[in-house]
Image (cartoon, helix red, strand yellow):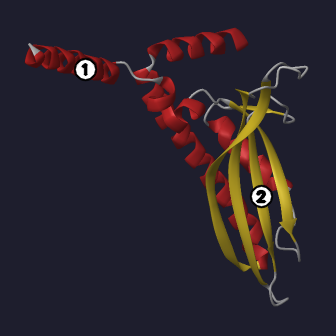
Amino acid sequence: MNGKIIIAILWLTIGSISFAQESPSFWLDGGIDALLATRDSFAITVYDEVIDGCLPKPVRLKEKMEKSLRKYGFGIQKEPGPNTNTIAIQAIGNRPKKNEFCAVHIATTLVINSAVSVPFADNLPTGNKTLVPFLYPIRNALITGNRASMQKRLTEQVAEFADKLYLDISIAKDDIFLKFPSIRDEYLQSKKQRQ
């Protein structure tokens, strides 16, 4: 009798495990792709900490990122806001020996603000929700060389960062939309409504 009960319990357990594997969990099976898949519009900010003439026109980094993202069909918002996905471009560097040689570290990060529940925070005007920024590092590089060519090289690097973001989002969409067709349908419907 005990053997039959153990077999029945094992049978039910195995059945539940296989059922769990067939039905993907958005948060457990989605991972970072769950956050990236539906990102299609961005604000862009540049944090310029470059001195000694190594980055004479930092606004060109923003312009290049915008142009590269628009090429892939992404929307660009003028200013970041609480519900805006923001691409932060940070450049820091100088001429170490005050000659024509520059060293600049450039990094891009996607900032995704997510509404999360805060335990025991029912007294807030917004209820128990708050915005928490999730930082997704796109890529970074250390660029060294002649000061005269630094602007051009950093601008080209930003274009490569945009290509990397596009690839990451495309892969995330493929993964999430395959696992969760209802998310794909909802995303496409919301995109139609925005147009």
Tell me which residue sits at (69%, 66%) in the image: 153
Res 195 visible: no
Instruction: Tell me the kind of residue under disc 2.
Output: Gln
Residue assigned mark 2:
90
Of marks 1 and 2, the one in the foreground: 1
Element class at badge 1: helix
Tell me which residue sits at (78%, 78%) in the image: 147
Place of residue 95 in the rendered image (x, y in percent of width and height, measured from the top left): 81, 82
Res 139 visible: yes
Classify residue 97 by image quadrant.
bottom right
Q: Which of the two residues, 152 or 189, is positioned nearer the viewer here?
A: 189
Q: Which of the two residues, 68 or 108, is positioned nearer the viewer here?
A: 108
| Left or right of 92 on screen, residue 179 | left
Asked if 157 appears above or below 168 in the picture, the reply is: below
Classify residue 4 by image quadrant.
top left
Marks 1 and 2 sit apart, C-alpha to C-alpha, by: 51 Å
Residue assigned mark 1:
13
